Amino acid sequence: MTNRKLKQTKWGKWLLYKRLGLELAKNVATRGGTIIIADKNDATETVNELIKESNNINIFYEFVDFASFKSVRAFAQELKTKYSKLDILVNNAGVGSGLGKTEDDLETTMQINYFSHFLLTHLLLDILIKAPHSRIVFSSSAAAYVTNLNKDNLKCCSNQNMFLRKIFSYSNSKVALALMSKSLAEKLKGTQVTCYAHHPGLVKTNIFKSTPIKGIWFLPVLILWTCAWLWGKDTDSGIQTMLHLITAD
């Protein structure tokens, strides 16, 4: 259940999210193991297609809404009830922009992209530690280099200038993920759990679908979308770094 070599064999239990996580699931489904695809949108049809294509009946969909800590806690409890260990956790759920507040009184982008990943990872640490050589992978971004993150704007619901909040909300969430990965790796020294943060590159996904193309966002989003569709990676190329991190010996 824990063999990660690149061959068709039984792998351990995987927890993946949609977008790049779904592409990753397609790639590894034929290798065996149990794969859990988590998302707030029903992925049952996708799961059925994966089962048919891979002949792996151990692929499941679980509901989780990363804009709600209550949902994240319920999801974690559901997993821990069903499974005694988790071999691989891929944290790649995210949105490009969202400055409204969640039910937890946090800025939407920061909660979905960072705080909920932080919460879920810590809630699942006990079953990750029980698996031999388990791995945690965070999808960060090169946008992390353009940030104004500090302790005063971590929640992104302060009196910070609205223009700056719109510019930095995404990049701040990504630098927070990178810092979390580094901190968690230090915390887990002495265990068999390893942590990684990676930048997949510019990939043709719908992550910025929620970003309104108006006002200050019009030009930068238009440029980003144009660059992505002209020169961006397809999703198969976009998962290669993740695939290496979770399979390399």
Image: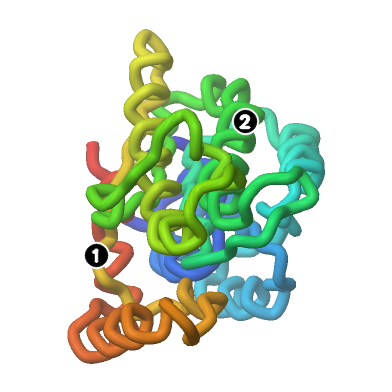
Image position, residue 37 (x, y; %): 61, 59
Q: Quadrant of the C terminus?
A: top left
Q: Residue at x 45, y 24 (%)?
A: 132
Amino acid at circle 2: Leu
Q: Residue at x 23, y 48 (%)?
A: 145
Task: Report x, y in % for residue 119.
Answer: 62, 34
Q: Secondary structure at mark 2?
A: loop
Q: Answer yes or no: do the residues labelled 1 and 2 have beta carbons within 8 Å? A: no
Nearest the eye: 82 or 200: 200
* Numbered label attached to residue 201: 1
Describe residue 249's horizontal placement relative to residue 132 as left or right: left
Residue 74: give its label. none
Front one among 240 and 84: 240
Residue 14 in sight here: no
Please, is residue 136 above or below residue 199 in the view? above
The amino acid type of the residue labelled 1 equals Gly
Residue at image position (35%, 13%) is 189
Instruction: Point out residue 28 in the picture as x, y percentages from the top left corner.
Output: 42, 61
Residue beneath disc 2: 124
Q: Is residue 52 left or right of residue 227?
A: right
At 32% from the left and 42% from the top, the residue drawn is 197
Single out the residue that lies furthest toward the left. Answer: 231
